[in-house]
Image: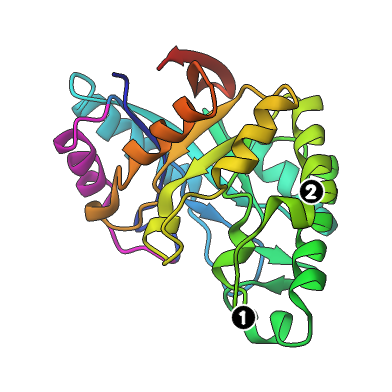
Amino acid sequence: MFLMDYHIHTSFSADSEAPMEDMILAAIDKGLDEIAFTDHVDFDERYTHPDYNLYIPYLDDLRHKYKDDISIKLGIEVGLENTKADLVNTITAAFPFDFIIGSSHSVKCYDLYFDQNEFFSSRTKQEAYSTYFEEMLKNIRSCTDFCVYGHLNFVSRYGLYEDNAVNYMEFSSLIDAVLKELIERGKGIEINTSGYRYGINDCYPDIEILKRYKALGGEIVTVGSDAHFPRDVADHIGAAYDMLNIAGYKYVTVFKGREPSFITL
């Protein structure tokens, strides 16, 4: 079976100290065929960004060193913000990325990590999560240069509610609008397994949203661990592949030069 992990962070991300080579060695040790490094670019001033003029040559040296052991793609995870669409689109167009994850890490200028209390404490779950998906829809329409939307129900990681889960039926009209917009624009979604590390014992998104994406005509799905440490590379990847099979998918998607191709499960 072809095994991939298309969501890996390194010390080039503000929230990781993992050397890139250590992540490659972990991926090889765990039997992966292909990985994508997706270090963070977010536009909140509290984050730092990689210098891609240095990053790309460094990655290329490691690609060459391990070319017989694993395929390595140049990726990026961009925090999409519709109010900064021109800046987002400029960054993504400036470098030869194979793969771009667009993610919602902030909502209406509130960073969900730094501003967790400020955003959630003044809103009901219905208000906060609806705002999150409404902003996601705006992001998709304005930030055009990405391949898949990352961890669609990421908001549930930071909610301050008794039940943080994103229930599809509760937000079905907004989630459907998001999924239809992605499909219309030729964009995919990822199955992000980090929910197993953050206490929800599931992937982002869950099986119901994955099934709905397929029912609406969606085909492009990547699999990623969102690893920030070598130990987490490929974490629960098997669960993501199980979800694909249960939901009726026949393929997993990989990218080169931002163009998708499909690998039979």
Task: Answer left or right for 208 relative to 174.
Answer: left
Q: Which residue is mark 2?
A: 172
- Please tell me how crowded label 2 is: few (under 14), some (14-19), or many (20+) other residues with Cα within 10 Å: some
- Give the image location of residue 187, x and y in percent: 69, 29
- Would you place residue 179 above or below residue 112 in this image? above
Is 143 situated above or below 262?
Answer: below
Q: Amino acid at mark 1?
A: Leu
Counting labels gives: 2
Numbered circle sitting on residue 76 = none
Look at 54% across and 22% down and name the residue there.
248
Q: Is residue 254 left or right of residue 156?
A: left
Residue drawn at (79%, 48%) of the image: 172
Quarter of the image where the C terminus is located: top left
- Residue 40: percent from left, percent from top: 51, 54
Relative image position of residue 22 (x, y in whole percent): 20, 48
Mark 1 or 2: the one toward you:
2
Marks 1 and 2, the one that precedes in the sequence? 1
**Image-quadrant location for residue 164:** bottom right
Point out the image quarter for the N terminus: top left
| Measured Cα–Cα span from mark 1 to mark 2 | 21 Å
Which residue is more in the foreground, 161 or 154?
161
Determine the residue positioned at 71% across, 87% down: 121
Give the SS element for disc 2. helix
Q: Residue at x 45, y 65 (%)?
A: 14
Question: In this rendering, is residue 229 above or below 126?
Answer: above
Q: Is residue 97 visible?
A: no
Above or below: residue 253 compared with residue 147: above
The circle on residue 160 is 1
Q: Which residues are magenta?
A: 15-32
Q: Amino acid at mark 2?
A: Ser
Of the pair 86 and 131, the residue shown nearer to us: 131
